[in-house]
Amino acid sequence: MNLKNASILAIDDDPDVLTAVRLLLKTEAADVVTEKNPENMRSILSKRSFDLILLDMNFNSSINTGNEGLFWLRKIKEFGSNAAVIMITAYGDIDLAVRSLKEGAADFVVKPWHNERLITTIKEALKRNDPKKAGYEEVSDSVIGSELLGESEIMRDIFFKISKIAPTDANILILGENGTGKDLIAKAIHQHSLRAEKPYIKVDVGALTETLFESELFGHKKGAFTDAREDRVGRFESGNGGTLFLDEIGNISLHQQAKLLSVLQNRQVTRLGTNQAVPIDIRLICATNVPMTELANEARFRKDLIYRINTVEIVVPPLRKREDDIVLLAKHFDRIYTNKYMKPMHDFDSKAIEKLRSYHYPGNVRELQYTIERAVIMAEGDVLQAKDLIFSPIESVQPQADEPQELKLSTIEKNAILKVIEKHNGNISKAAKELGLTRTALYRRLSKYDI
């Protein structure tokens, strides 16, 4: 639908915001209606329909859920409205705004917004909401949780696995390199679990000393050790009824492993300085960048603890094995940072896309995120070019140290590629298909091995 023909409803309890919307859109849209009180929506929507609704994320209303925007977004759907909904949010609530996309919102804008950015967002939302437009694929088909996106087959398999295991209380072990998004998967599992309304507690256990480990996880009584000036509840007790996410579990000592195993077996904790056991009820999720082959070495990690924390295992692939997701993620980060820095959204020219696809990403999704943020800040104009994409110099260009097997197999891989190409008489498409690679990935290997 064209914006000139659109009717728009703006709902925000800040009159200055409503005035700004009205002045901006009065010459752009056919009709603009503003409302301060979201509780009047039912009455308004029962009398007429709108093509698009601008909805604030936070209201000083009688609802007081802490996420009023999501509450009223659901109500709009219950009222039978087919309007596209754009959420208006502060930057600090972006995680909540991204969650609104999963709930059915068309998009979100961060206030104070850039006028051109808001108009562009409205036009795109109206276009996507046009029932006559075919072939559009919603972002929500490729997202689970806050920022866990993916269209590749390997990520769709992970999403399916999450949908199956999240409603259970099974303990989960997430494996993957640094920067692959293990923490996002842990949070997505919690958000889709029966414990979603209960606490979600994250602890980087690999960074804790022996004393801090017990104090942080199990709590302590005043005077239990030097500097213990007051009673403290540990993370197990804080997360009672919810989910406890222990990150970098592969880096804790054997002594710490024994302490953790005892708690998991007995389902109770004892604070330092006491003899009183406290029952705990938590769903445990652990993550590590240590490969399972190293964890299986009992000189490094107790096998009985592995079995305890690893009812179900999720292996998160590095970004270099998710080629189909790279552009999707890049555009997602562009939207986040153009909102943050109040700049117009960017298109990516063909050379920029080629550069994104051909890079090996030793820093994984985290490196891509920082690369796009830097490009958004430095780029001129509304098109990102290859020269705007500067990858992090702190990441080694050498293969990951935890991938020795790939190095040892390089000769075998080269010979396999040569054999398959010869089999198909030099046809790259057929060779790539048999090898299970994309054409681009195969070309990279041809360059790597000087074939």
Image (cartoon, rainbow, N blue to C red):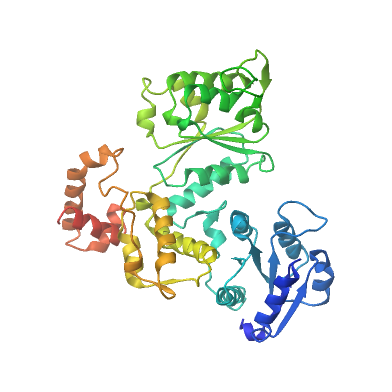
Quarter assignment of residue 354 = bottom left
The quarter of the rendered structure image containing the C terminus is bottom left
Tell me residue 204's x, y (percent): 50, 35
Taking the spot 20% from the left edge, 60% from the top edge, the residue there is: 424
**Observer able to see residue 446:** yes
The structure residue drawn at horizontal position 45% and vertical position 71%, both measured from the top left corner, is: 346
Q: Nearer the viewer, residue 283 or 343?
A: 343
- The answer to whether residue 238 is above or below residue 110 is above
Residue at x 21%, y 39% (from the top left corner): 408
Quadrant of image for the N terminus: bottom right
Is residue 328 toward the left or the right of residue 191 in the image? left
The answer to which of 239 and 12 lies nearer the viewer is 12
| Residue 353 x %, y % | 36, 67
Residue 29 drawn at (x, y percent): 66, 83
Residue 296 vs 49, above or below: the answer is above
- In the rendered view, does 258 fall on the left or right side of 22? left
